[in-house]
């Protein structure tokens, strides 16, 4: 039988509308905590009957659960989350390192990953003196597209391929969160050059007033960025040599430990 050759094309791949609608419904349920058919219909743009058909199928697959007239994500999603955690090399190699950082500094230590121009929190540990626990727990449930204002985001941006970086800078606004937020693309590029030179990134109250962060990139053997490890704390504690030298050195060391764990296959459980 002659092999079938598919024509090469630059046209965007076709998508399945029904699957898009299903994903939209799941996302609406995720961010809301629970919605009725009518509420979903208003937010998704489908008829109530169409929404009900999607929900019935999802319920049969244990992906949503029904409580009266309200629908929520089903417990099967816990299995998906566990699968990602158990099969993520970065989490397995870095969570022990992050936990040690949090224990020794008393602050919040996290592992981050960039995917599709968004920043995800893979693992987070609160030290004894950690600030804003409720805020950070809520925040990690959402990926952020604003990489320019956090140390972990800038640590990752600094090591992205130029084309990938420029795509992010072109497509996303550098939103101002505080007077210290870098909103000029050229200034951000210069800041990222400094990050590459010193091997770590600093956020000087650029995302939230009174909060500073330190981030170091986790690189593969070809210096491609796999993610970042970060430390978050109040300006009252992250200042002077602690913020400028001592903790940055510890972050670079922590990132190196994660890189070694990734290469050797060691996981700190």
Image: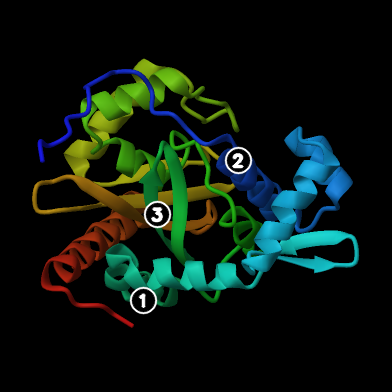
Residue 215 screen position, x and y as percent: 35, 51
Is residue 15 rendered to the left or right of residue 61?
left
Q: Position of residue 264 (x, y in %)?
A: 11, 72
Quarter of the image where the C terminus is located: bottom left
Asked if labels 2 and 1 touch by Cβ distance under 8 angstroms, the answer is no
* Vertical placement of residue 15 versus 137, above or below: above
User: What residue is disc 1 on?
Assistant: 100
User: Which residue corresponds to mark 3?
Assistant: 112
Q: Is 238 in front, or is 56?
A: 56
Location of residue 61 (image quadrant): bottom right
Q: Is residue 228 above or below residue 66?
A: above
Display colour scheme:
rainbow
- What residue is rendered at 55% in x and 40% in y? 207
Front residue (pair 42, 32) = 42
Q: Secondary structure at mark 3?
A: strand
Of the two numbered discs 2 and 3 in the rendering, the one whose residue sits closer to the viewer = 2
Q: How many discs mark residues in the rendered view?
A: 3
């Amino acid at each position: 039988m002659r092999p079938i050759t598919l024509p090469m094309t630059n046209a965007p791949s076709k998508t399945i509308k029904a699957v898009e609608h299903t994903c939209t419904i799941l996302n609406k349920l995720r961010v809301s905590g629970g919605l009725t058919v009518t509420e979903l219909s208003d937010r998704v743009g489908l008829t109530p009957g169409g929404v009900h058909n999607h929900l019935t199928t999802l319920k049969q697959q244990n992906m949503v659960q029904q409580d009266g007239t309200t629908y929520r994500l089903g417990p099967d999603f816990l299995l998906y989350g566990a699968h990602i955690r158990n099969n993520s090399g970065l989490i397995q190699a870095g969570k022990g390192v992050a936990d040690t950082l949090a224990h020794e500094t008393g602050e919040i230590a996290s592992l981050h990953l960039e995917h599709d121009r968004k920043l995800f929190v893979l693992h987070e540990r609160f030290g004894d003196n950690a600030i804003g626990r409720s805020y950070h727990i809520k925040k990690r449930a959402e990926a952020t597209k604003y990489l320019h204002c956090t140390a972990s985001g800038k640590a990752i941006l600094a090591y992205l391929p130029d084309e990938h970086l420029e795509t992010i800078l072109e497509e996303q606004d550098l939103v101002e969160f505080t007077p210290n937020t870098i909103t000029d693309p050229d200034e951000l590029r210069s800041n990222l050059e400094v990050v590459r030179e010193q091997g770590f990134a600093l956020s000087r109250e650029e995302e939230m007033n009174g909060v500073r962060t330190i981030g170091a990139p986790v690189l593969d053997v070809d210096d491609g960025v796999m993610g970042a490890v970060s430390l978050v704390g109040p300006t009252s504690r992250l200042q002077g040599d602690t913020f400028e030298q001592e903790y940055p050195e510890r972050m670079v060391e922590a990132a190196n430990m994660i890189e070694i764990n990734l290469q050797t296959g060691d996981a700190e459980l």
